[in-house]
Amino acid sequence: MTDRAHVERLELRVRGGSAESSRALAAALGEALGPVLEAQLRGGGGRIERVATGPVRARPGDPPARTAAAVAERVAGTLGGGERA
């Protein structure tokens, strides 16, 4: 059996970011969120309609990977705590 995750839509609001930094963050999020979603599927979580988390605050100049890791951590906490919208 193969588990698959298909993300239909990822909405991310970044204040004051450039197009280049937004693309870098999107790429980093793709890498960071994959393991979180795969773990949810392995745990029998089934379909995830929507995950709504609070804001993740990043400092100006933080590398995209650091911000993506913070977002992935927030998503994992939300999925683990059953706080799905």
Image: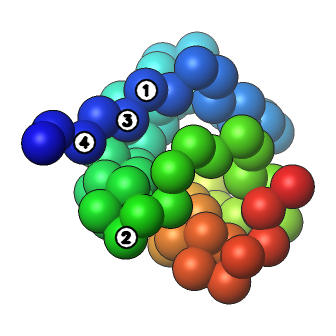
Helix, strand or loop at mark 1: loop
| Residue 24, x across and y down, in percent | 40, 30
Residue 68 visible in rendering: no
Question: Label 1 near label 3: C-beta < 8 Å?
Answer: yes
| Residue 49, x across and y down, in percent | 71, 40
Could you tell me the amino acid type at mark 1?
A: His
Could you tell me the amino acid type at mark 3?
A: Ala
According to the picture, the residue beneath numbered tag 3 turns out to be 5
Please identify, in this view, whether the residue under mark 4 or under mark 1 is nearer the observer.
4
45 sits to left or right of 27: right
Residue density around tag 1, few if under 14, some if 14–19, many if 20 or more, within 10 Å: few
Which of the 4 image quarters holds residue 30? top left
Residue density around tag 2, few if under 14, some if 14–19, many if 20 or more, within 10 Å: few
Residue density around tag 4, few if under 14, some if 14–19, many if 20 or more, within 10 Å: few
Task: Tell me the number on the disc at residue 43.
Answer: 2
Question: Label 4 near label 3: C-beta < 8 Å?
Answer: yes
According to the picture, the residue beneath numbered tag 1 turns out to be 6
Helix, strand or loop at mark 3: loop
Label 3 to label 4: alpha-carbon separation: 7 Å
Please identify, in this view, whether the residue under mark 1 or under mark 2 is nearer the observer.
2
Task: Tell me the number on the disc at residue 3.
Answer: 4
Q: Which quarter of the image is occupied by the N terminus? A: top left
Helix, strand or loop at mark 2: loop
Task: Tell me the number on the disc at residue 38.
Answer: none
Residue depicted at x 72% and y 76% = 82
Could you tell me the amino acid type at mark 2?
A: Gly
Could you tell me the amino acid type at mark 4?
A: Asp
Question: Label 2 near label 1: C-beta < 8 Å?
Answer: no
Label 2 to label 3: alpha-carbon separation: 13 Å
